[in-house]
Image: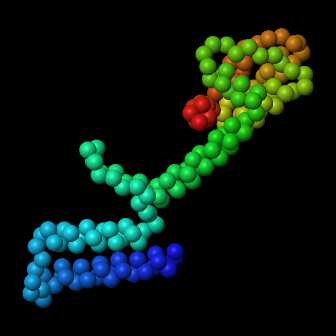
Amino acid sequence: MKARRIGTVLLAILLTIVYLVYLAGIPLGLVTRRLEVHEVALAAALLAGVWFAASSCSITDFSIGAGGVSARLDRTEARQRVLESELRALQVALSGLVTKYEWDHLRRLAGEGPVPARFRQDGKLQLELERLDAMGFVEPVDAQRGLDAIREDHGHAYEEFDLTRYVRTTKAGREYLRLREKL
């Protein structure tokens, strides 16, 4: 298959050189019989066809009908399969970037209204928010106190509080949400 493609490329190069020599020979007076415009156009179309054949594309389906001309290119389908595979890999990567609990915090913080939360003695809430902060998806409302404000204000009791008083979603966090929802 490679040898055939190399042969096609060499043929395309040879025909291109002949075509260019012919075109250059016209103003120099080297051409005694000039081709008509439609013959030059046909030669250019054939040359384009040879170059297309030399490329890595191949036509798998070609039709001419009332709807016009249509052709299916094999390379396009192969590229589409590669892109679909890459898209699937991105979907997996995006969905695995944050845990389901971090995803829930991020999604709720990006929404409207209060986000009820409870301080956990095991520090799990704090770790999830710190990880989201480290990725740049959320930021503390109070830059001076940071995320420690939650522990300082609510670490002594198991009471519900509004998480939006302490943390807000960043532009990067909203963009991550948008991309993940889209995929």
State whether residue 97 is above or below residue 146: below
Examine the image and state in which quarter residue 52 appears. bottom left
In x, y percent, where is residue 6? 46, 79
Q: Is residue 129 at least partly visible in the picture?
A: no
Residue 54 image position (x, y, % from top left): 41, 72
Between 108 and 141, the one nearer to me in the picture: 108
Most foreground residue, 4 or 148: 4
Q: Position of residue 153 (x, y in %)?
A: 81, 16
Picture residue at 79% right of the left edge, 21% below the top: 150
Q: Quadrant location of the C terminus?
A: top right
Name, please, the residue furthest toward the top. Answer: 159
| Residue at screen point 76% across, 12% down | 161
Instruction: Name the residue: 70% across, 16% down.
Output: 115
Residue at point 83%, 22% (across, down):
151
Q: Is residue 94 visible?
A: yes
19 or 66, nearer to the observer: 66
Q: Quadrant of residue 148?
A: top right
Where is 50 relative to 160, above or below?
below
Q: Is residue 10 left or right of residue 104?
A: left
- As drawn, the residue found furthest toward the bottom would be 30
Q: Position of residue 25 (x, y in %)?
A: 16, 84
Above or below, comparing residue 21 to residue 69 in the picture? below
